[in-house]
């Protein structure tokens, strides 16, 4: 995962040069106290804007001329608030086109939606791709005579066709996969089944998953290859690398992907020197038959698939697998695995890995995965469809006869689409209906006229109206349509009751609605459709005789080889029944009918497969490497699905939108089994909380009890992180057989300052409500009265307040209880399937596997350390800005692969709030170990088994019961990471700070953390302007900040020269300036303002950070690292964040700097590009 990368690699940017335009427009605010005479204009959203700086065209013209002189002819333009006021962007285009620019993409036209960062990315993508598309179209058209007389259409990412002259880059990203979605939507839903359909498109290099239930599911912001695009796209989720997914055996685990063999060199059987991949596993099992494949392989591309090479590669892996098994303590009990068993194991692991995101896609939107049909297409999908459907509980698979080329077929079936969209800033209420109806009518007319010019008659055109709606104060917007013919109510505009549609959709996806909260309309959209009425293929005649097998081969399944009939799809007729095991072969795909499944040929020649129950093989408690890998996915899937329920049912912005939470599964001993790894500071910490409750409550825990805890002595990180723990009982047991827990960051739980993160707290009671072992649910009853009293308790302390948002607290706690219940149900299903003894045994096995991975890493570190220094003892020291010392000594046993990690010598508990609970130190340690392992390992109790941790009582890393800790969680945690990585000599220090900034008053509150420089390493420069280590927070978009809060983002840029010099330079920090528009209170909680981020191996340290206040009267005042000050209108806060340390002596001519990674780098590791809503959720949690 990205959060564990020591070398932070970001995608290449699409642009070559950047020009900063001298102009500035800001939104008018009634409460703004900056009194200046600005020109006021009205935007498309009817919002008022002030022109603070008019467009300087003279300077711009000179800057553009410099770009032209470099040969650049394509331009992307994005200005602040241009989504509503586009006059300056249009003026820039007029100027640029007169000067000779051939492509000018305006963000206000490409996608006029609020949020400048994704809108700017979209404009860049459009300017980058559109010239390429125009060149392609020109070349394509040159091959036709009188092409202008033909109707030539291109598929767009939204699943609609568009004329060749309107095809643009920003709408072309997913045009290929979109054709497949249209293909299965038009041929499966309500034709072969009434159930909604999951599309499963597995090819050689990627696997795409989507859903259709009568309407195309669109998303309006996606990230592909690191580029965020704001444009309507079908929600197509790339979840795996397809048949090219590489196979690995690591520390006892079977691992599939995410690395891909790609199309070149491809798998071993392609004979181009590639690695073992899923395709090789299917080949060795007899599921792929070389004689039915074209001879296009080998260096000369004239050879058949090479099974012999694949067998040799698996023989080598077989040796590795069996030698590892024999090396384990109980190795004598492990059977010798054959290459078929190993290949079958990899197929089962690959299938389970693909099931996880399918569950996430459906359950995230409130749907039951099992109540779907699996529509399988793509060249490789047919080999896995039966197994995946069975694992997901589906009863039917549908395979179109053109499954191998369904994306192309879908394009032929697609309708022509014309979209129009514009921004809005209204509440959904009767007084806004005339404006909404008027704009919808205007956009409908635009779409209709455009389609009529393309030859569609009025009766062939359908227009659908959409509103992009969200609750006020939230960011979770839904694009909603409605039926205009339904019964009209008070909340119906002319185009329908959008409020009812919004509430129904919100309830389906999130499980609740928010009474009394206003609903905002962010965008108005119309989708016009010109019906093409392309018919599907003619029906086949009825079968008059049983199907005839082409031949019979031996194919490997669970339990061994079975005789498997081979059929040619073109020879089959309507009504033919084929019992599994069987293989149906077409020119473009191979479909495997597994044992206990039955295939039927439909009247149009497609294949409908009825999935029978799986033939269960007895699984014992002894370790099996394949089952270990599968259980690893199942346990992690449990934690992930708990998180989805929590996100769906929570109400607060912190949990629902910032995704600041973690969910985990624990064994009967309270040891961590699986923790969906989203928040680094939560890693491993909840284990301390669960085991504390076991010690304190013991046998008093009963079924129906749920415990709430946040105290540092009970394994808490800081008070706003509330942990909800549920003990789980199974039928016939008297004590818990396992535990589930969820930890969520509550925006406020009382204390001296809003947000419960006071910069000057000296006691934990100033930081909010405290819970050690609180019964949140007792005997199945939610203890609302008692927990309300506890959340109000801080109000009894002088200078402190009760919780400022009790409603959200209670709602989110109920959501955490619901998330835990989901985890209970999922693990009980596992126990029902495998038995309690087997599930508990594999909980232990998965912990032991993590222990093996860490032991191997420690042995390797010990070997390298001894070679370098002659000893296996490591040590490091660093300081907090108040002078408090963190000392670490590590002794590694190279033989056993164990270590003693000793923090003796660390400073005493401090008077302020930079004390770190013991759980935070353990989280930092487990994070560092995972970084150093270098590949995915289960993050659980086993990671710390080889490590004996010594933290002296009373030091700042294990403070007393009443010590203040809020700074320890967000600041000291970073310094602990710095010290650990320094001791191991991994890399130079990163900025070592989260730069916590809060401002607000009685009406508004805002919190952010700000990026800085990353440390350099042995082979890499540190990345500039990024978050590192224990935080991954995504900062709020500047347009949202200025729209909702009384500030202006005056500057946000890199601060050159702040990274430490060295053979490899540290990353630079950033400069961020916030201009305040009214009286507010500003609080800052920062570090690395005194002690600079260290360099390593002769590298220079990064530059310290600094917090400055530029007062309106001209004074510049240094605020120090931690303070709270009152500001007035016109004051400006300037934040300068630290740079990262350098690595190696500066000016070392013997080492060349690392090459910049380009997208076309032939030596780069092939990785499939994740995309879609599942990927967006994952990214958001890794940046939460």
Image (cartoon, grey):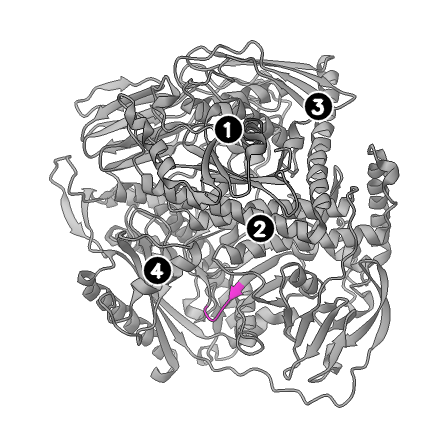
Query: Magenta segment range?
Result: 211-215
Mark 3: secondary structure: helix
Q: Which residue is mark 2?
A: 825
Residue contact between numbered discs 1 and 2, judged by CB atoms under 8 Å: no
* Mark 3 or mark 4, whichever is nearer to me: 4
Q: Please identify the dominant SS of the magenta region.
A: loop
Task: Choose between 190 and 772: the one closer to the eye.
Answer: 772
Residue 861: which numbered mark, if any?
3
Above or below for 451 versus 767: below
Residue 58: which numbered mark, if any?
none
* Mark 4 or mark 1, whichever is nearer to me: 4
The Cα atoms of the two marked residues, 3 and 1, are separated by: 23 Å
Q: Is residue 235 magenta?
A: no
* Mark 4 or mark 2, whichever is nearer to me: 2
The Cα atoms of the two marked residues, 4 and 1, are separated by: 44 Å
Q: Earlier in the sequence, mark 3 or mark 4?
A: 4
Which residue lies at the image location 59% right of the left edge and 22% below the top edge?
981
Q: Earlier in the sequence, mark 1 or mark 2?
A: 2
The Cα atoms of the two marked residues, 3 and 4, are separated by: 56 Å
Mark 4: secondary structure: helix
The Cα atoms of the two marked residues, 1 and 2, are separated by: 42 Å
* Left-right relation of 300 to 830: right
| Residue 471: image location, x then y, percent | 31, 52
Q: Is residue 214 magenta?
A: yes
Task: Choose between 922 and 297: the one closer to the eye.
Answer: 922
Q: Earlier in the sequence, mark 3 or mark 2?
A: 2
Q: Which residue is mark 4?
A: 503
Mark 1: secondary structure: loop
The quadrant of the image that shows the C terminus is top left
Q: Which residue is mark 1?
A: 1014
- How many marks do you count on the picture? 4
* Mark 3 or mark 1, whichever is nearer to me: 3
């Amino acid at each position: 995962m990205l959060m564990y990368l020591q070398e932070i690699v970001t995608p290449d940017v699409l642009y070559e040069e950047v020009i900063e335009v001298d102009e500035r427009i800001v939104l008018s605010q009634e409460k703004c106290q900056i009194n200046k005479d600005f020109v006021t204009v009205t935007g498309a959203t009817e919002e008022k804007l002030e022109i603070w700086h008019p467009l300087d065209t003279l300077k711009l013209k000179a800057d553009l001329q410099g770009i032209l002189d470099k040969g650049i002819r394509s331009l992307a333009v994005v200005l602040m608030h241009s989504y509503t006021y586009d006059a300056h962007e249009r003026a820039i285009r007029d100027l640029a086109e007169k000067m000779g620019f051939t492509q000018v993409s305006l963000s206000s036209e490409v996608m006029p939606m609020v949020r400048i960062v994704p809108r700017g990315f979209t404009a860049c993508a459009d300017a980058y791709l559109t010239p390429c598309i125009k060149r392609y179209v020109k070349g394509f058209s040159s091959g036709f005579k009188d092409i202008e007389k033909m109707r030539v259409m291109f598929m767009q990412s939204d699943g609609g066709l568009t004329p060749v002259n309107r095809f643009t880059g920003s709408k072309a990203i997913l045009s290929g996969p979109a054709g497949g979605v249209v293909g299965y939507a038009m041929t499966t839903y309500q034709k072969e089944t009434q159930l909604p359909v999951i599309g499963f498109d597995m090819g050689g290099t990627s696997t795409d998953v989507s859903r259709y239930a009568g309407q195309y599911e669109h998303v309006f912001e996606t990230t592909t290859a690191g580029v965020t695009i704001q444009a309507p796209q079908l929600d197509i989720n790339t979840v795996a690398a397809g048949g090219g997914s590489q196979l690995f055996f690591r520390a006892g685990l079977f691992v599939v992907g995410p690395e891909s063999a790609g199309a070149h060199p491809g798998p071993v059987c392609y004979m181009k020197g590639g690695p073992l991949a899923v395709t090789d596993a299917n080949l060795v099992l007899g599921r792929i038959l070389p004689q039915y494949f074209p001879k296009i392989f080998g260096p000369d591309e004239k050879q058949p698939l090479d099974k012999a090479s694949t067998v040799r590669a698996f023989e080598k892996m077989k040796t590795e697998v069996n030698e590892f098994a024999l090396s384990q303590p109980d190795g004598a009990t492990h059977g010798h695995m054959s290459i078929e068993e190993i290949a079958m194991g990899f197929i089962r692991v690959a299938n389970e890995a693909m099931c996880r995101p399918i569950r996430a896609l459906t359950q995230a939107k409130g749907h039951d995965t099992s109540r779907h049909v699996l529509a399988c297409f793509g060249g490789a999908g047919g080999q896995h469809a039966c197994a995946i459907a069975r694992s997901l509980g589906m009863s039917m698979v549908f395979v179109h006869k053109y499954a191998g080329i369904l994306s192309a077929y879908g394009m032929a079936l697609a309708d022509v689409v014309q979209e129009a969209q514009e921004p809005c800033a209204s509440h959904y209420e009767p007084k806004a209906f005339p404006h909404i109806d008027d704009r919808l009518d205007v956009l409908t007319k635009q779409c209709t006229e455009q389609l009529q010019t393309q030859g569609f008659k009025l009766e062939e055109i359908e227009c659908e109206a959409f509103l992009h709606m969200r609750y006020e104060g939230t960011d979770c917007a839904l694009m909603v349509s409605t039926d205009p013919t339904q019964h009209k109510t008070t909340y119906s505009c002319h185009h329908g009751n959008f409020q009812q549609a919004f509430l129904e959709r919100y309830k389906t996806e999130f499980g609740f609605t928010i009474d009394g909260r206003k609903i905002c309309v962010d965008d108005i959209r119309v989708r016009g459709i010109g019906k093409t009425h392309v018919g599907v293929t003619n029906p086949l005649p009825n079968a008059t005789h049983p199907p005839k097998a082409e031949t019979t081969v031996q194919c490997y399944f669970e339990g061994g080889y079975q005789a498997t009939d081979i059929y040619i799809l073109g020879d089959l007729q309507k009504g033919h029944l084929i019992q599994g095991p069987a293989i149906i072969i077409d020119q473009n795909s191979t479909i495997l009918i597994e044992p206990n499944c039955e295939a039927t040929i439909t009247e149009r020649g497609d294949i409908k497969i009825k999935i029978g129950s799986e033939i269960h093989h007895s699984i014992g408690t002894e370790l099996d490497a394949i089952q270990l890998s599968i259980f690893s996915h199942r346990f992690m899937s449990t934690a992930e699905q708990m998180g989805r329920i929590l996100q769906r049912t929570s109400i607060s912005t912190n949990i629902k939108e910032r995704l600041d939470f973690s969910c985990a599964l624990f064994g009967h001993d309270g040891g961590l089994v699986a923790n969906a790894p989203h928040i680094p500071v939560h890693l491993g910490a909840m284990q301390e909380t669960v085991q504390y409750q076991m010690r304190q409550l013991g046998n008093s825990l009963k079924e129906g009890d749920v415990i709430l805890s946040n105290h540092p002595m009970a394994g808490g990180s800081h008070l706003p992180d509330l942990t909800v723990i549920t003990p789980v009982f199974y039928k016939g047991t008297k004590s818990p057989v396992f535990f589930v827990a969820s930890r969520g960051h509550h925006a406020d739980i009382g204390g001296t300052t809003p947000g419960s993160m006071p910069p000057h707290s000296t006691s934990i009671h100033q930081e909010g409500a405290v819970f050690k072992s609180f019964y949140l649910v007792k005997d199945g009853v939610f203890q609302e009265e008692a927990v309300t009293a506890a959340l109000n308790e801080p109000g009894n302390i002088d200078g402190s307040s009760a919780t400022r948002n009790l409603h959200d607290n209670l709602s989110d706690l109920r959501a955490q209880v619901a998330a835990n219940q989901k985890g209970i149900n999922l693990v009980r299903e596992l126990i029902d399937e495998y038995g309690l003894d087997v599930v508990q045994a594999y909980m232990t096995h998965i912990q032991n596997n993590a222990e093996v991975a860490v032991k191997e890493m420690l042995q390797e570190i010990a070997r390298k350390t001894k070679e370098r220094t002659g000893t296996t003892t490591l040590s490091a020291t660093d300081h907090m800005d108040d002078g408090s010392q963190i000392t670490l000594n590590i002794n590694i046993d190279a033989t056993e692969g164990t270590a003693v990690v000793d923090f003796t010598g660390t400073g005493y508990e401090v008077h302020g709030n930079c004390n770190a609970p013991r759980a935070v130190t353990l989280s930092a340690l487990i994070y560092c170990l995972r970084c150093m392992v270098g590949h995915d390992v289960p993050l659980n109790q086993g990671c710390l088994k080889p490590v004996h941790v010594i933290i002296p009582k009373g030091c700042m890393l294990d403070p007393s019961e009443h010590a203040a800790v809020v700074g320890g969680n967000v600041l000291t945690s970073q310094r602990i990471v710095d010290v650990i990585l320094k001791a191991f000599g991994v890399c130079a220090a990163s900025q070592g700070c989260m730069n916590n900034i809060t401002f607000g008053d009685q009406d508004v509150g805002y919190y952010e953390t700000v990026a800085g420089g990353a440390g350099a390493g042995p082979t890499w420069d540190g990345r500039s302007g990024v978050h590192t280590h224990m935080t991954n927070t995504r900062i709020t978009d500047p347009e949202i900040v200025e729209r909702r809060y009384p500030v202006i983002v005056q500057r946000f840029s890199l601060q050159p020269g702040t990274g430490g010099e060295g053979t490899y330079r540290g990353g630079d920090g950033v400069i961020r300036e916030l201009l305040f528009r009214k009286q507010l209170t500003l609080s800052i909680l920062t570090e690395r303002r005194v002690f600079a981020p260290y360099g390593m191996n002769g590298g220079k340290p990064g530059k310290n950070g600094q917090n400055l206040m530029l007062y309106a009267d001209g004074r510049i005042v240094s605020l120090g690292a931690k303070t709270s000050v009152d500001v007035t209108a016109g004051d400006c806060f300037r934040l300068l964040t630290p740079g990262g340390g350098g690595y190696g002596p500066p000016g070392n001519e013997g080492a060349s700097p690392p090459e910049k990674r380009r997208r076309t780098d032939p030596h780069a590791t092939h990785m499939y590009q994740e995309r879609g809503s599942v990927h967006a959720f994952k990214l958001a949690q890794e940046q939460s």
